[in-house]
């Protein structure tokens, strides 16, 4: 894995969780020596720093059947070119970068290397990720299956067409941030109602976490779960009316469209 920041780190933590069966050691690189040193002593990870070792990325991919590129979108092509001559023939290269299509990555790599795009999210850290996977032109069904199984070890994986990956990023890739924003705002609103920080955290964040878990476990859809809270002529109804009057449906459409526009821009940067 090249790049072990927020997203790479979440995938790595999910892969290292007890019960996950994966061939080790996992070779990783980070930019700083300090973040690589955080893995000193681990017997399942070999970490290198690209800052202190110019060959770190090439060394990490040597002999690897599966390589995950988890650096920033604007660095993906440089890193692909950098590791190109060290890749095993037949290796699978997965890019989790937002925006960057498979075609330029394929062009930066040797023929015979399969490129697959994946759009994961940070709940992969706790084995609850959602990942969209799309093969590039060079990836066959076996390569897609390998990548799907990899991401299934850290959550749920969905194979989509590449032209749907930006939309996956807008919904599930970025999705955790929308929920955390909701949690921030609800906690702040609870504080403004007079609760102290600890109380506001329990009331707001405990409710969001419990509701998410209920939605995950209950077969009923969110509309039905909401109905069960919203007594006719009750209190919830009044709050929902205020929220809906703010134009939520349109707001979500506009937010997701802005997200997709940024992916399209990233493709050209
Ligand atoms: N953060 C998220 O929730 C998601 C991020 N992504 C994608 O994941 C990628 C990484 O994003 P984040 O993890 O958020 O960024 P980040 O900044 O937290 O992590 C980037 C990592 O790349 C490393 N790095 C930088 N230059 C390097 C080099 N030359 N060689 C080796 N490692 C190098 C850094 O040390 C760091 O570990 C992006 O392409 C992003 O679009 C995709 C889905 C969700
Ligand atoms: O914000 C970003 O660009 C990345 C892609 C999806 C989630 N985080």
Image (spheres, rainbow, N blue to C red):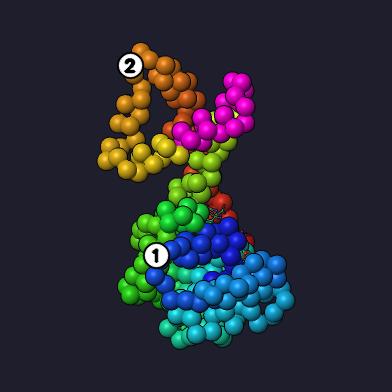
Residue 151 visible: no
Q: What secondary structure is the stretch in magenta mostly built from? A: helix
In this rendering, would 74 be left or right of 98?
right
Does the beta carbon of the residue at mark 1 sit less than 8 Å from ligand 1? no
* Quarter occupied by residue 150: bottom left
x 36%, y 67%: residue: 149
Q: Reply yes or no: does residue 202 show up in magenta.
A: yes
Percent from the top left, x then y, of residue 57? 61, 78
The residue positioned farthest toward the right in the image shown:
52
Residue 156 versus residue 2 in the image, above or below: above
Secondary structure category for the residue under label 2 = loop
Q: Write down the residue under mark 2.
A: 232
Left-right relation of 216 to 121: left
- Residue 116 is situated, as x and y percent measured from the top left of the image, at 44, 69
Which mark, residue 205? none
| Quadrant of the drawing holding the N terminus | bottom right
Q: Is residue 191 left or right of residue 127?
A: right
Q: Quadrant of residue 221?
A: top left
Q: Nearer the viewer, residue 14 or 129?
A: 14
Task: Please give the name of the residue rendered at 59% of the width and 32% of the height, measured from the top-left corner.
Answer: 198
Q: Residue at x 47, y 76 (%)?
A: 24
Q: Position of residue 230 (x, y in %)?
A: 36, 22
């Amino acid at each position: 894995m090249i790049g072990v920041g927020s997203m790479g780190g979440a995938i790595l933590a999910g892969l290292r969780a007890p019960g996950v069966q994966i061939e080790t050691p996992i070779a990783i690189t980070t930019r700083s020596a300090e973040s690589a040193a955080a893995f000193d002593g681990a017997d399942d990870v070999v970490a290198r720093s690209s800052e202190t070792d110019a060959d770190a990325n090439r060394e990490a991919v040597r002999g690897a059947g599966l390589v995950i590129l988890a650096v920033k979108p604007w660095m993906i092509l440089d890193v692909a070119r950098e590791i190109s001559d060290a890749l095993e023939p037949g290796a699978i290269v997965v890019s989790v970068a937002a925006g960057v299509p498979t075609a330029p990555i394929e062009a930066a790599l040797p023929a015979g290397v399969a490129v697959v795009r994946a759009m994961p999210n940070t709940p992969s850290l706790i084995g609850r990720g959602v990942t969209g996977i799309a093969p590039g032109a060079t990836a066959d069904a076996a390569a897609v299956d390998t990548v799907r199984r990899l991401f299934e070890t850290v959550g749920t994986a969905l194979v989509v067409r590449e032209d749907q990956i930006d939309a996956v990023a807008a919904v599930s890739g970025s999705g955790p941030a929308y929920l955390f924003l909701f949690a921030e705002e609800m906690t702040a609103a609870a504080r403004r109602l007079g609760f102290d920080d600890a109380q506001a955290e329990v009331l707001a964040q405990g409710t969001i976490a419990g509701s998410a878990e209920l939605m995950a476990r209950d077969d009923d859809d969110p509309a039905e779960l909401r109905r069960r809270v919203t007594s006719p002529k009750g209190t919830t109804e009044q709050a929902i009316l205020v929220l809906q009057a703010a134009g939520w449906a349109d707001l979500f459409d506009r937010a997701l469209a802005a997200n997709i526009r940024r992916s399209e821009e990233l493709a050209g940067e």
